[in-house]
Amino acid sequence: MKNKILEIKENSQKEIKQIENLEQLNLFRIKYTGKSGLLTEVMRGMRDVPKEERPMLGSLVNEVRTFIESEIENLETKFNEIELNKKLANEKIDITAPSKNSETGTFHPIQRTFNKLIDACVEMGFEVVTGPEVELDKYNFEMLNVPKDHPARDMQDTFYITEDIVLRTHTSPVQARVMEKRQPPIKIISPGRTYRVDNDATHSPVFHQIEGLVVDKNISLLDLKMMLTKLLKILFGENTKVRFRPSYFPFTEPSVEVDVSCPNCNGEGCNLCKKTGWMELMGAGIVNPKVLENCGIDPKEYSGFAFGQGIDRLTMVMDKIPDMRMMFENDIRFLKQVK
Ligand code: PHE
């Protein structure tokens, strides 16, 4: 029995030297220390051994088992290490290799113009309010002093959904909605998408506006002129000239058209300003007392001014975009160029 045990030890020592990988090591483990392995078999044979010899033989078997198990463990650690190193070598990252190009996103040029205007207005104390794009005729026209048969409706070619519902032709209905709900002081801007039946190089059926409205006691045309001059100088630079021309809108009286000296040529005259040196920017005026009345604000106590600024043409000037339709095609090459 003792010899058998020593033989097992000797054989195991020989065999273990030849083991080259984890698979072979596993077979070796099963052969010697497994449930029906050689050592287990020897233990079973203990029954036939005289009682006095059992302790000695038992501890010998344990010794051999411990020896084999520690050999297995050592080898296992070694093979695992080898495997890991192999993996690391294969998966090595070359930090000097050129990277794959990843695209960075940007704001659409129209959104950039919006952001500039909104930031400037918020700094002046305006609150930003939005309203629905599918709008009731009542807010888009009637409360703004444009009744159904009014000739001014021809100024704005309208998409009608039903007789009483339109795609808003300007962001001005938001001022009616706000005034209907609140009493002055009111100081809001309303940016958003607007719609008119129009489609060529300088008109898109979908376009963008920002509306401004200030209603309080003693608001006059002077306030309007001061505020807009300040805003436009923030946007285009301190040396920009601002010009107010008389105009007509049903919702303002008096009404003005606001121009700035062309930001492209500084008023010298270029193709963008059609050699005039001026750029038409927005409509504005003193809120027509009828509009205040329609919205439940007493025109004897309060007055206000409003302005409506188109965003699209302004963006074309600032980013030198030759055709308005390019801004809505979502061609990524265009968006990259005007970044
Ligand atoms: N809503 C007008 C338009 O779109 C612009 C405007 C707004 C004019 C406010 C005067 C006052 O044409």
Image: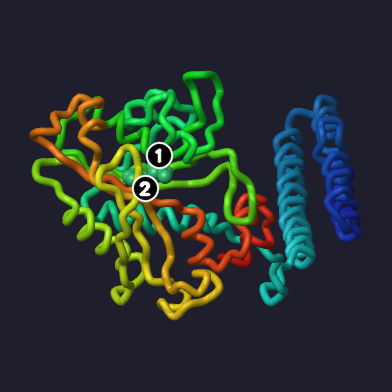
Q: Is residue 6 visible?
A: no
Residue 314 lies left or right of residue 16; in this view the side is left
Q: Mark 1 or mark 2, which is nearer the start of the sequence?
A: 1
Quadrant of picture, ligand 1: top left
How many C-alpha atoms fall within 10 Å of the one at disc 1: few (<14), some, or many (≥20)? many
Q: Mark 2: is the Cβ under 8 angstroms from ligand 1?
A: yes
Circle 1 SS class: loop
Residue 90 lies left or right of residue 55; in this view the side is right
Residue 136 x, y percent position in the rendering: 43, 23
Please state, as top left, top right, bottom left or bottom right, where the N terminus lies in the image. Answer: top right
Q: Residue 86, labelled with which disc?
A: none
Residue 274 x, y percent position in the rendering: 52, 70
Q: Is residue 294 visible?
A: yes
Q: Residue at position x 62%, y 67% from top? A: 337
Please state, as top left, top right, bottom left or bottom right, where the C terminus lies in the image. Answer: bottom right
Q: Nearer the viewer, residue 338 or 325?
A: 325
Query: Is residue 116 depicted above or below 43 in this figure?
Result: below
Q: Residue at position x 29%, y 48% from top? A: 255
Residue 164 x, y percent position in the rendering: 47, 19
CA gap between label 2 and label 1 equals: 8 Å
Q: Residue at position x 33%, y 73% from top? A: 240
Residue 161 lies left or right of residue 49; in this view the side is left
Q: Mark 1: is the Cβ under 8 angstroms from ligand 1?
A: yes
The residue identified by callout 1 is 171
Q: Quadrant of residue 56?
A: top right
The residue identified by callout 2 is 308
Residue 82 lies left or right of residue 215; in this view the side is right
